[in-house]
Amino acid sequence: MSEKIKVKVKCHHSGIFKTDGGVLNYVDGKVEVVEVDSVTIFEDVLIYLLEKQVKNIGKMWYKLPFEELSDRMPLFKNVDANKKKLVAKGRWMGEIDIFFEKADADSLEGTLPAEKVIEDAKLVLKDNVSEDEGSDGQKSDAGLSESSDSEGEDDIRENDAEIVEEDIQVFNNENYEEQILDEDEEYPATNDESGDEEQQAESDFKKNIIKYILKTRRNVVYSRWEKKKLEAKCKGKGCHWEIYCSVENPIGKWMVKRYHNEHLCHPTGRCELIKTPIIADLFLEDIRRDPEMSGPEIKDEMKRRYNIIISPNQTKVARRRIFDRLQAECDEQFSRLRDYELQLCKTNDGTTVEINTTTRDDGSEAFSQMYIFFEALRSAWKQNCRPIIGLDATFLKHSMKGQMLTAVGRDPNNQIFPIAWAVVDCENNPNWEWFVRKLKEDLGLGLGENITLISDMHKGLIHGVATELPMAEHRACARHIYSNLKKFHKENMLKPLF
Ligand SMILES: [Zn+2]
């Protein structure tokens, strides 16, 4: 069963929708706020109204708090599918507006007679009670769909009362999404590196509009996008905010020609231009740091940082975009390893870089090992550091995986001093032996006379040291011993001993 999420419902009842001078209003109604379980929003609200003795219920509608009345969605036709959408939106938003129109004798067609509603709600009540008693009564899915005569208009989805994450995708095919299109590239993609002044202006314009939206939460959209003319307007109701700029021909420069900086609208937190590429930009670094960041977390963070509302689908697509981008970054850097090697050697005279590859079955090259030792570190270690080297390995994250082998020393201030490092597929005998041999050659360690090594005593490491530096003093790292002992002896008495 899905976890219990409460939804705050603003329940408007006993009124009707009326259009006055082109503006839609809900008139003569009452409002009550009620908190219900998200899975049974519809049923719970009906029961609530019945308990309040509200009768004569006609058409039902719902909308998200920030949506306009005209965006409301019907609950009186295609009931099952719409109820699911209601549940998904309610769970997502935590708040929802539901409207019950008074049944009107003139327009009873397509509405639910009050008796029927009451009957259905009673059925729900009964079901709920029987469920509470532990008997396996049928799921609390009031038979409202039977009274709906509009089946066939849309396909009605299979019944399943449990709403799982995937169901949130029902957002996909409705007005809400249509107005926040994601993948449409209405405007040419701009390229920052291009020296072309027009493209640069476009890109600056775009960047600053997005900045402005994030700051003000106004629903500003591009209204003109030509080679020499750019314009953006606020889409808020009755709002005249706009900015227009174009190329001033005599001087060939971009100029802001018109700027009306006054909003008559209310910021709703719903901004059409905040699409997935923008969201991906905003959260790239967050996901780089914490790849586990989920869609709902992105949504919450978007709300917290900018007070802007984005849809579940947008967070999903944005996350995918970010991962694609991080992967592409990784691939790009990987493909330029040889360039990196050249550059390191060119700019750091005497530096040792070794990149080894293996051959795949199809004959292509595959990365196997990389070793880096900067000349500056080598000479500094030889001149200043004590003859002690610490060896250890650590796991690498992201798509590449593998392990990093490191060698560190102690400088005259007794601080950690980096010596050399390598990237390998895993910590094993051949890899440690190779790394220790490289170290030995670069530092001129001979057979390891007068040198002390500290490590966690990994088997591969012991093998490598024994093979390459047989004369070295090889001791276990106290920190590793302590943490191993601590696993079995939780008392605090151990720590002072180390
Ligand atoms: Zn405005």
Image (cartoon, rainbow, N blue to C red):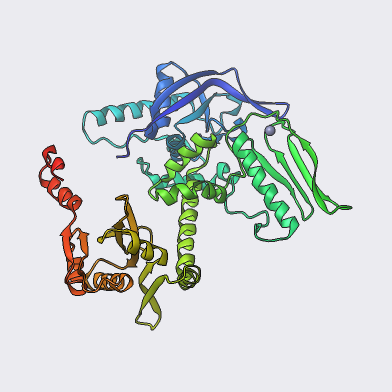
Q: Nearer the viewer, residue 194 or 125?
A: 194
Vertical position of residue 16 compared to residue 327: above or below: above
Residue projecting furthest to the bottom: 363
**Residue ranking furthest to the front:** 383
Q: Please tell me which residue is depicted at 46% across the width and 37% down the height of the picture.
A: 300
Q: Is residue 383 visible?
A: yes
- Residues 493 and 58: in front is 493
Does 437 sit left or right of 48 as displayed?
Answer: left
Q: Where is residue 7 shown, x and y percent of the image?
A: 42, 29
Decide: is 428 above or below 149: below
Residue 70 placement (x, y as % from top left): 62, 33
**Residue under the point 21% across and 73% down:** 447
Residue closer to the observer: 57 or 298: 298
| Residue 349 coordinates in the image, percent (x, y) | 46, 70
The image quadrant that residue 364 belongs to is: bottom left
- Camera-side residue: 292 or 274? 292
**Is residue 79 in sight in this rendering?**
no
Q: Residue furthest top?
A: 53
In this rendering, would 427 be left or right of 354? left
View quadrant of ligand 1: top right
Residue 99 at x, y percent in the picture: 53, 27
Q: Quadrant of residue 432?
A: bottom left
